[in-house]
Image: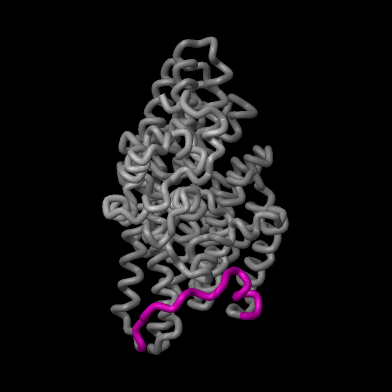
């Protein structure tokens, strides 16, 4: 076995790959197609051990072993880490952007801003969001500070509505991939599309076309932010959402402004910063009410409820859930803006279940509200909403464990893991942490212990 062959000294070697290995035709073909399993197999033929590959790429040996067995690697950040760790030119894997594009679209800013305190970043974004929402001019001095200018590739000199529709169609298709397979599956394609689409801002076109372009690109930036968030690139997410706010405001689209603020608020909930999230949701509520969209108001109320639940304010959380359901019932779904149409009756149940799950972790009485809502959501989500279904299965399993139904909770938890294994999303792993904690607490039960072991293997993979 490789693990017994070289000891610690072998793991520390950083130049184990022969200099000419990357230039051989078979290796170049594997790199060009991003077949990392083939790359690793070729490295093994060159005498590079699994331990050495793991040390150079920052992966665990078990992860390297899984890749050697055929597991695909698709997330951009993982591919670049592998390329840099092995000393491969990024261009050989189709990952090469010039520096400006890397900062603007791909997310190298994440590393550059790492030393800035996260709370400072949150306050800075909140200030920007408040300026945009409350009527400050966009595309001013601040708008250029979120990221550097994009690289130049050919774009039409004059654009028409057909060009804008192409951006909209690409965004819809990529969003569907994100829902089903996770942001890690499609983020690279999203940012590549954005790199091209952004340049159409400099093309000539009628005011009607340019206005629709602002909105289309705002939505694409929002998707770039969401997929960045889903892959753990928080600084990139923040930058894309800031640009989305500017463009949505320029396009005079209040529902989209509300949607962007809701999504950035979700980033802050994920970072366990419910106070900051609540402020963004409340700003989003202003934009939603200006739009006259009951559906947008419903979305914001549901997420405000989530923030209050995380803050331990049970009364406000339950009150806002009630308002969210009321606004949803009044909403004209047929005439709703496309950016809020994602919020269906199933999502209402999902949010009710999610909020009561947070409350149940402090007061188990809330499982009686969470379990029916989550069950309804799980039964309604199809394979096209695989990530959302996984979230709900995990929360449902957590509630059954809290409720003392360890056998059923463990079975549902197993289904959550089965779904999660096919999704490339860091958020899925993070959202399953409460389930892992509850399973670990009940290790004296055989079913819970089996679930805890499966979850441990899932996180180790």
Residue 136 position by quadrant:
bottom right
Q: Residue at x 38, y 42 (%)?
A: 423
Q: Residue 305 location, x and y as percent?
A: 59, 45
Q: Residue at x 50, y 76 (%)?
A: 252
**Count of picture labels:** 0
Is residue 208 within the magenta segment? no
Please tell me which residue lies in front, 165 or 363.
165
Q: Is residue 94 left or right of residue 309?
A: left
Q: Is residue 131 above or below residue 273?
A: below
Please tell me which residue lies in front, 367 or 202.
202
Q: Residue at x 32, y 48 (%)?
A: 35
Residue 290 position by quadrant:
bottom right
Q: Residue 34 location, x and y as percent?
A: 34, 52
| Quadrant of image for the C terminus | top left
Q: Is residue 426 above or below residue 3?
A: below
Please tell me which residue lies in front, 154 or 134.
154
Q: Which residues are magenta?
A: 140-157
- Residue 45, can we see it? yes
Q: How is the image coloured?
A: one colour
Q: Name the magenta segment's main secondary structure.
A: loop
| Quadrant of image for the N terminus | top left
Q: Residue 293 location, x and y as percent?
A: 48, 63
- Residue 255, can we see it? no
Q: Residue 431 location, x and y as percent?
A: 51, 38
Please tell me which residue lies in front, 356 or 427.
427
Is residue 145 within the magenta segment? yes
Q: Residue at x 49, y 55 (%)?
A: 228
């Amino acid at each position: 076995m490789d693990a017994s062959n070289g000891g610690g000294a072998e793991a520390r070697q950083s130049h184990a790959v022969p200099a000419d290995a990357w230039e051989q035709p078979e290796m170049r073909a594997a790199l060009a197609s991003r077949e990392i399993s083939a790359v690793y197999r070729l490295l093994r033929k060159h005498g590079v051990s699994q331990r050495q590959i793991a040390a150079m790429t920052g992966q665990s040996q078990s992860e390297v072993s899984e890749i050697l067995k055929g597991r695909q690697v698709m997330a951009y950040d993982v591919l670049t880490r592998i390329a840099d760790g092995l000393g491969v030119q990024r261009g050989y894997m189709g990952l090469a952007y010039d520096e400006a594009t890397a900062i603007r679209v791909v997310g190298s800013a994440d590393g550059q801003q790492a030393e800035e305190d996260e709370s400072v970043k949150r306050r800075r974004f909140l200030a920007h969001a408040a300026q945009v929402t409350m009527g400050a001019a966009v595309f001013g001095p601040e708008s250029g500070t979120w990221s550097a200018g994009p690289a130049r590739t050919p774009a039409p000199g004059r654009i028409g509505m057909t060009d804008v529709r192409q951006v909209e169609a690409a965004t819809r298709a990529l969003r569907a991939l994100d829902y089903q397979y996770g942001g890690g599956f499609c983020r690279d394609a999203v940012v590549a599309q954005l790199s091209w689409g952004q340049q159409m801002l400099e093309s000539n076109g009628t005011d009607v076309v340019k206005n629709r372009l602002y909105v289309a690109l705002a939505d694409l930036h929002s998707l770039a932010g969401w997929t960045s968030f889903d892959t753990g690139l928080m600084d990139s997410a923040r930058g894309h959402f800031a640009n989305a706010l500017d463009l949505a405001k320029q396009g005079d689209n209040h529902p989209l402004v509300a949607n962007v603020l809701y999504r950035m608020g979700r980033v802050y909930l994920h970072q366990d910063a419910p106070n900051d999230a609540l402020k963004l949701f409340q700003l989003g509520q202003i934009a939603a009410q200006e739009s006259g969209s009951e559906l947008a108001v419903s979305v914001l109320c549901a997420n405000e409820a989530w923030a209050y639940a995380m803050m331990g304010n049970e009364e406000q959380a339950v009150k806002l859930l009630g308002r969210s359901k009321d606004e949803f019932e009044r909403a004209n779904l047929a005439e709703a803006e496309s950016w809020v149409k994602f919020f269906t009756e199933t999502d209402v149940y999902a949010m009710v279940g999610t909020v009561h799950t947070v409350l149940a972790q402090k007061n188990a009485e809330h499982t009686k509200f969470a379990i029916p809502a989550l069950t309804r959501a799980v039964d309604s989500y199809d394979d096209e909403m695989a990530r959302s279904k996984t979230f709900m299965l995990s929360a449902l399993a957590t509630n059954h464990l809290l409720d003392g139904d360890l056998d059923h909770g463990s079975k549902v938890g197993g289904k959550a893991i089965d779904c999660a294994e096919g999704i490339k999303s860091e958020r899925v792993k993070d959202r399953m942490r409460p389930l892992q904690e509850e399973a670990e607490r009940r290790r004296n039960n055989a079913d819970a212990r089996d679930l805890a072991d499966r979850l441990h293997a899932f996180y180790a993979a």
